[in-house]
Every structure is written in C-alpha cells, then in structure tokens.
Image (cartoon, rainbow, N blue to C red):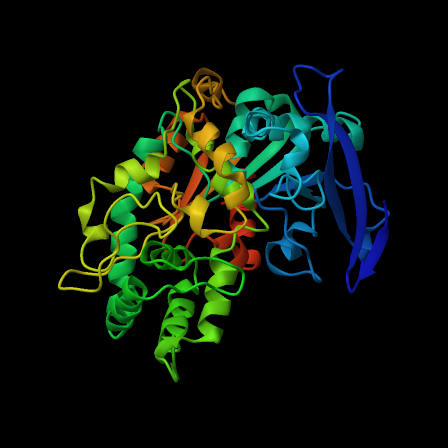
Amino acid sequence: MTGRHRQPGLVLTDHHFDVPLDHDDPAGEHIRVYAREVVATSREHDELPWLVYLQGGPGFPAGRPVGRESWLDRALEDYRVLLLDQRGTGRSTPATRQTLPLRGTPAQQADYLAHFRADAIVRDCEHIRRRLTGDRPWTVLGQSFGGFCAVTYLSLAPEGLAEVLITGGLPGLDADADAVYRAAYPRMERKTLAHYDRYPGDETAARRIAAHLAEHEEVLADGTHLTVRAFQQLGILLGTGDGSHRLHYLLEDAFADTPDGPRLSDAFGEQVAAILSRAHCPLYALLHEAIYAQDGEATHWAAERVRAEFPQFDRHGAGGDSGSGADGGNEPGAGGDRFLFTGETVHPWMLHTHPALRPLRRTAELLAERKGWTPLYDAARLARNTVPVAAAVYHDDLYVDTAHSLRTARAIRGLRTWVTDEYEHDGVRAGGRTVLDRLLRLVRDEA
C-alpha cells in the first residue's frame, strides 16, 4: 500500500519495488523492497538530488523518523532522502522465524538467504535508483553495515554514485570473519575495563548477576534463557555514546527480594530481553558472519572458535565450554578474574537460548557451513575510484576495527577520512547534524 503522510516539517511517501531475488536471474522469483521517501515540507515540489540511507546491521530496517531529527535535519537541507528497508527487513518481504518456513526446508531457507548480502542490496539500490531518478546518480549515506554496502556499491556500480558518505562502516577489504573477531575481542575487553573505570561498582554487580545465573535458571518474559554468556552480550551497549551509562543503570537495579530469595527483577529482565531479542532482526544472527565471507570458505561460527583464543572471557563467571546446549554452556560463578562483557558476536548456543532463533537453528547451521561465498569488494576498481568519498572513522569503535578501516581508506582512491574520538559507533545519530555536515564538507572539498 502506497501512502503519503505529513509530520511537522516533513512529507513522507511510501515506495514499494519488486526486485529479483537473484539479480542474475531477472526473470525468476521476485521479492518486495520497501523504501520511505522523506523531503522537507518547504521543498516538497523542488527538484532535489537523492540521498539513500543504508542502515547498519545486517538485518535492521531503516529508522522511522519523527520530525527532523538527528542527521536527517541536515540531509533535508540538500536532498530528497530515501530510507531503505534492506531486503528481508521492515516492510520489505520479511525473513523471520514466522515467514522463512514458507521457503521450505532449512536447506531451501539457507539457499534463499544466501541472496541477502551486500551485493544483492546494492543491486536492489541500482534497480530502485533507475526507477526514481531517471538514471541520474545519487548520494549514499552508509552507517556501519550500510557503509560495508557502500564500499560494495563502489566496487560493483560506481556509475550510480554521485557521492558516498560512510560512518563507522569501512570494512576490511580482505579481513575474513576470523580476522574480524580476532581484532574484536581485545576491543571488547578494553571497553569493559573502561566502563569499570567509570563505574567501579559495576564489576561487583556484574559478578553477582553472573554467579546467580550460574546457579539459577532465569527465563525472561519473551522466552530467552538468560545464561552467563547471554548476559555477557549486554556489552553490545558499550559501542554507543550513552551505552556505558545505560548499562550502569541496568546493573544497579538487577535484583528483587522474593519469598524464594533474591531473583532477577522483572524490570531488569524486561530491559535485558529488549536488548538481546532477535525477534525483529533474525538476519542479524543468521547472516552476521556471512557479511565477512568472501573467499569461498565457510565461516564455521568464527566468533565462537576465535573466542577460545581469549580465555579471559571464560574465567570465573564468564562461561565454560562452547555452550552448544540449551543451557548455553557450563557456566561457573564469579571468581577472582575480571568479568568481561562481549559485544556483537553470534554463537551457536544462541540458537537455543533465543526464542526467535530456535526454529531457525538448522538454517543457521547450514549458513555457517556454507561454502562458495563470492567477493564483495573489488580492490582494483576501488584503487581507480573517481567517486567523491568521505568516511568518519571512530577512534576505538567497538563494532568495526579501526586499523581495518584505515587500511581500507588508503586503498580507496580519493577517500577522505575524519578520525575522531568524540563519538562512538552511533555518532551519526548521537551527533545530530554535526557528523553528516562534516562529511559533506569533506566530500565537497570544503574542509
């Protein structure tokens, strides 16, 4: 259903596009991709260049704007903005535990989802661009995984691009999943210890929760089994500007006194369930490691395998073995070593503890075992790049390795970087107009 709506300062228009599931087979099956056009009320009838926003993820839809908030306020001064729900997300043809069984067996589901990586998203964008712009190039703003998609765009279809703006999303061009997580675990440790420096009492609170979880089964309201390893994943908050503060407030109200003794409070459990839930974004878990796969080899649960190289995450309250069972592993209570949070890693035990993933367990296993992943980046073409590109690289980004990003920045001809420690990974949202304005000035040689 196509509609047009108004908010104070905005006109929003729905767009639906039928695109090939496999762009190499345009006569084959098609799926639906949704995008929301946003334009300033005062410029509704102006001929404006387009800016398409590629959300982070994988597996997240574009944000739903309420007025001229955050980066959108700056973008609407110059552009007609397209907020894309990447294939499988939001109002596009969904891919969830409820819909994927329509595809058939787990093997058929895995084959279907193999068409949901950055290369397919870029080809969706090109299909849409030609429909909307009359084949004029447009500007891409890529946040996090959206930045990965933007680099794929530069590799596959630079003729469709007028400018590229990237925030926290310069991928390692040749970094496989093992290399990504081998660089990630030390960052997770640094971020945890920095949090404890800010809130020293939080390590005691985290240890107490871990010890409790090691001795008691806790099932959250949405059906999530909260194991020690699942609790560790609250460290994903530490990659955002306000995340350390949010984690602190969460930890300080964790327990309630009950007739059966201290138990985790309902308020704590509700907030944790919202953070850990994959109900709205199962592709985040199913395809997370596949976004790094380019050499034809299977990822084989890279984050789980590489974690074994960092035993400090599994000492005294952080989980014992690989946790393939429903209880998430053999998880002892708190002890003498540091309790470390983790971040955006995906593990096989999540297929048991997370209710939105349980029905997709075999599909996830097949994707982890899948071979034949094709390259997403063309280093030779990037070295000849002529599209203006600017990228914000966050100094110690929890989610994207800074060293990998800077190597890629040097490999893309003409790319200008802004390396900053003013923001965390969510700088384009937290920074309001500032981050996008800085990137626009860089890409236009005004700074």
The answer to which image quadrant residue 177 occupies is top left
Q: Position of residue 118 (x, y in %)?
A: 55, 30
Q: Position of residue 198 (x, y in %)?
A: 28, 70
Q: Quadrant of the N terminus?
A: top right
The answer to which image quadrant residue 70 occupies is bottom right
Q: Position of residue 30 (x, y in %)?
A: 74, 26
Total marks shown come to: 0
Q: Write the residue at 45% across / 63% down.
A: 219
The answer to which image quadrant residue 24 occupies is top right
Please state which of residues 13 and 167 is positioned toward the viewer in this rendering. Answer: 13
Any part of residue 56 in sight:
no
Q: Write the residue at 68% across / 34% down.
A: 102
Say above or below: 303 vs 76.
above
Please state which of residues 282 and 223 is positioned toward the viewer in this rendering. Answer: 223
Query: Furthest residue to the left?
Result: 336
Q: Position of residue 409 (x, y in %)?
A: 40, 32
Say above or below: 247 vs 172.
below
Q: Write the residue at 44% across / 27% down.
A: 412
370 vs 119, left or right, is left
Please state which of residues 21 and 189 is positioned toward the viewer in this rendering. Answer: 21
419 vs 90, left or right, is left
